[in-house]
Image (cartoon, rainbow, N blue to C red):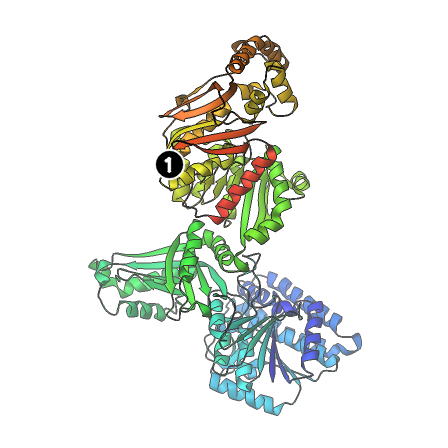
């Protein structure tokens, strides 16, 4: 004997029903079958609704009844040929008339008891099983329609009746002996009391029906056919990259189903557990997929955990009181009080001091639970033995489940490290003595983020989703997207990083939502689907998405973007920024950002603030981390000025060299932005701060290379005309340096708490003397490097090297501890 159960989605359409028939036709060649079916998808919900409407004397229930009738008649007309469908339609109409009469009675008396509701909602299974049986008979398959109310006997807990197994098993065994049809089509979900009153087994009870049939007949296999590929590592509606597992033990499946795994109804496993009957979960729409086999524990399975499940809305009740310490029987009294009110406890945790006890219940039972506990402990509350009974709503319970978690050290550490790194606060923790389940409670808004975080940490061979939100698609931002597209496979295979662009914005448009933006086709998507840019809305939607491993990237030069940095970091969203504005503003704001990032377990990376992709800031951090002290910093920190003075050799005038640099694209559109030295000053300020100095911009003395009479002119052409008049001055400086075997170099220097940026003459003993092209160079004089400086040299400007530096920062965020912040 083999039991097949088909869920509502598996029989939800005529096409789906044909797939079911094909599966049954193939299976019945090898085994005698009991086929348990649910109502067509959505019908049970409709039956609940129309029963409530009938009670309210609301005629809209008739419209729903008409919809149900049409859907089932249409299905019969599509799956059964016209010459053979009259019996199926007649059987359906008889049941429909019975339902209609009951609803009229409910409407007339305007009263709906739980018993009547159970009778009404059970019609969905009766309809679908009857139609499937008729369809099988029409295909030449020997089939018998069976109303399980005749067989499955329960108490009178209407809505979630408890099965009387001894009577039920005996009824099923006798029924199987009396009937010899090869395929028995049975209604799921419904049952009856010993007085033959209709009862139901609870939502999802069709799985339980299949399990009862399996246990009663000693079936060799129970197959549960649904619309997913098996028991998933997580809910695919919450975790996009969830996948099915090939195997789970009974205990793992029970733990996961208790915490919300929708594939299998929690009570299903109990009847078959002792008999060792395996349960196979299969996908009706992909029958070729192997699915998930649930059976006794195997000695060797892959992975430490089997899956992650969650209950997305719970209430946490906490009982707190110093008078509870050392008092026996407190927990027993709590459980007893809740049991009297039929309140189910999902999770419980107690502090080792016995000072507090917390338990999770469903939100609709929270106030009843609190009231029952208050009544039980009224004397203790009166005498301040119990200080507080508190309800916290909008919580979620998450369970990490795995047979292999037992006696393997570090699993809990991995779980809570991953959560902490993503700024997810754990409100309560519980671990069962079986060690198969680590359960914890988080704020409901963090549920999806928490489940995704843990899933990334334990599955996909360590592959991690990195969710990027980019503002600024100019030279650097555009190049960044191009490099990410070119390198995405290498990032996946080499670093196990799955780069997802979740948000994108220019000064005019933004595109942000649940779906990822294409790295290759982002311009078209932004143009077609983008909305008007609002920085505040962009940040709010990024925060609302609350995705794990999120990184905000500021590739603008705007001073306005820094205003949202603190808010972003407070959400445990890391920031990567080539934009120097934030770090070169006040020291107070600089410190605030570092402290905020550290407090909220995220990272603020800005390696590209100085030297584009050169590891200048990273080098300072390495020096400081190893106990070194930076005494002096010297550098050529402008690629533009490096190019100008490396090419100003006296053969061409200074103004001509600057003009050539502009034509080659080395300068800003207005070269005065480079020549005034302010950008170099900001870079020196940042380096000094990273090295541990408390310094403001006014502590940097900057020599402006733009002549005074050229600073305020309106056009660039007019500027060059003015600059040309000062060529003699610059030519004289160059000749003086050359005659002394020296060269001109625009150097930034910080020492003894003060910074200076100026044009200097250096000889061949200076480490910057042989600098060429547009390269940057920085020399660090430290306690360890006191005689000969530590030097970092290379291309310090350009969109490609800067974008590459941004990618390096992204990798640092993804792969280093978030506590090492501030660009390290």
Q: Looking at the picture, does residue 157 appear above or below residue 696?
A: below
Is the residue 404 above or below the residue 749 in the image?
A: below
Residue 544 visible in the picture: no
**SS of the residue at dot 1?**
loop
Residue 43 position by quadrant: bottom right
Residue placed at 57% from the left, 61% from the top? 58
- Which residue extends farthest left? 383
171 or 557: nearer the eye?
Answer: 557
On screen, residue 446 above or below 640: below
284, above or below 813, in the image: below
Q: Is residue 744 left or right of residue 21?
A: left
Nearest the viewer among 119 and 674 is 674
Quadrant of the drawing holding the C terminus:
top left
- Residue 645 in picture, x, y percent from top left: 56, 20
609, 45: nearer the viewer: 609
Image position, residue 377 (x, y; %)? 26, 64
**Can residue 463 be seen at all in this image of the molecule?**
yes
Based on the displayed image, in which of its 4 quarters is residue 774 positioned?
top right
The quadrant the N terminus occupies is bottom right
């Amino acid at each position: 004997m083999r039991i097949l159960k088909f869920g509502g989605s598996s029989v939800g359409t005529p096409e789906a029903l044909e797939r079911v028939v094909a599966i049954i036709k193939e299976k019945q060649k090898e085994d005698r079958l009991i086929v348990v079916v649910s109502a067509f998808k959505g019908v049970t919900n409709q039956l609940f609704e129309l029963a409530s409407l009938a009670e309210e004397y609301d005629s809209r229930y008739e419209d729903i009844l008409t919809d149900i009738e049409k859907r089932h008649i249409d299905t019969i007309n599509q799956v059964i040929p016209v010459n053979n469908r009259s019996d199926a339609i007649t059987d359906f109409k008889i049941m429909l008339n019975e339902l209609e009469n009951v609803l009229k009675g409910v409407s007339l008396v305007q009263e709906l008891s739980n018993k009547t509701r159970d009778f009404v909602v059970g019609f969905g299974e009766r309809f679908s099983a009857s139609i499937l049986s008729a369809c099988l008979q029409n295909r030449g398959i020997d089939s018998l329609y069976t109303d399980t109310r005749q067989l499955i006997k329960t108490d009178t807990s209407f809505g979630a009746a408890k099965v009387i197994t001894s009577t039920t098993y005996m009824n099923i065994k006798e029924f199987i002996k009396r009937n010899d049809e090869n395929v028995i089509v049975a209604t799921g979900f419904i049952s009856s009391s010993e007085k033959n009153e209709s009862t139901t087994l609870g939502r999802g009870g069709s799985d339980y029906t299949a399990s009862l049939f399996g246990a009663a007949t000693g079936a060799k296999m129970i197959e549960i056919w649904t619309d997913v590929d098996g028991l998933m590592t997580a809910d695919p509606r919450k975790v996009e990259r969830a996948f099915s597992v090939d195997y789970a033990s009974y205990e793992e499946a029970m733990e996961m189903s208790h915490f919300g795994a929708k594939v299998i109804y929690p009570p299903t496993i109990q009847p078959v557990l002792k008999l060792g009957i395996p349960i196979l979960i299969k996908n009706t729409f992909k029958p070729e997929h192997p699915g998930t086999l649930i059976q006794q524990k195997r000695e060797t399975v892959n992975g430490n955990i089997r899956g992650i499940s969650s209950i997305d809305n719970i209430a946490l009740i906490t009982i707190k009181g110093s008078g509870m310490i050392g008092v026996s029987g407190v927990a027993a009294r709590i459980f007893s009080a809740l049991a009297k009110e039929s309140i189910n406890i999902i999770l419980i945790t107690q502090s080792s001091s016995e000072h507090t006890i917390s338990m999770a219940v469903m939100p609709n039972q929270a106030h009843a639970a609190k009231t029952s506990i208050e009544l039980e402990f009224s004397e203790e509350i009166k005498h301040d033995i119990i200080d507080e009974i508190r309800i916290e709503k909008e919580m979620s319970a998450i369970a990490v489940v795995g047979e292999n978690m037992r006696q393997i050290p570090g699993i809990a550490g991995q779980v809570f490290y991953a959560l902490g790194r993503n700024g997810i606060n754990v409100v309560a923790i519980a671990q069962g003595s079986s060690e198969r389940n680590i359960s914890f409670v988080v704020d409901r808004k963090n549920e999806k983020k928490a489940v995704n975080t843990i899933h990334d940490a334990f599955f996909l061979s360590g592959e991690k989703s990195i969710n990027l939100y980019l503002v600024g698609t100019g030279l650097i931002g555009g190049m960044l997207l191009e490099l990410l597209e070119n390198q995405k496979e290498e990032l996946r295979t080499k670093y196990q990083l799955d780069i997802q662009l979740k948000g994108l914005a220019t000064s005019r448009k933004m595109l942000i939502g649940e779906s990822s933006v294409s790295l290759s086709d982002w311009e078209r998507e932004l143009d077609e689907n983008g909305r008007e840019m609002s920085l505040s809305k962009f940040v709010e939607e990024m925060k609302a998405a609350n995705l794990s491993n999120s990184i905000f990237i500021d590739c603008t030069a705007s001073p306005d973007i820094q205003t949202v940095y603190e808010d972003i970091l407070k959400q445990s969203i890391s920031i990567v920024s080539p934009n120097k504005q934030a770090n070169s503003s006040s020291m107070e704001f600089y410190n605030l950002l570092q402290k905020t990032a550290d407090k909220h377990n995220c990272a603020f990376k800005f390696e590209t603030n100085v030297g584009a992709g050169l590891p200048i800031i990273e080098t300072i951090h390495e020096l400081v981390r190893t106990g070194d002290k930076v005494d002096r910093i010297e550098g050529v920190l402008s690629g533009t000025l490096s190019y100008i003075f490396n090419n100003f050799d006296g053969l061409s005038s200074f103004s001509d060299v600057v003009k050539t640099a502009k034509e080659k694209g080395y300068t800003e559109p207005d070269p005065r932005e480079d020549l005034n030295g302010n950008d170099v000053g900001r870079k020196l300020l940042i380096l000094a701060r990273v090295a541990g100095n408390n310094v403001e911009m006014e502590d940097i003395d900057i020599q402006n290379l733009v002549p005074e009479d050229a600073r305020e002119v309106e056009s660039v052409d007019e500027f060059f005309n003015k600059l040309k008049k000062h060529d003699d001055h610059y030519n004289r400086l160059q000749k003086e340096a050359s005659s002394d075997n020296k060269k001109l170099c625009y150097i930034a220097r910080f020492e003894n708490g003060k910074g200076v940026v100026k044009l200097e003459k250096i000889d061949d003993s200076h480490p910057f003397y042989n600098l060429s092209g547009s390269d940057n160079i920085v020399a660090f004089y430290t306690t360890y490097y006191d005689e000969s400086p530590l030097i970092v040299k290379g291309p310090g400007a350009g969109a490609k090297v800067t974008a590459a530096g941004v990618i390096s920062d992204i990798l640092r965020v993804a792969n280093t501890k978030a506590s090492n912040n501030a660009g390290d």
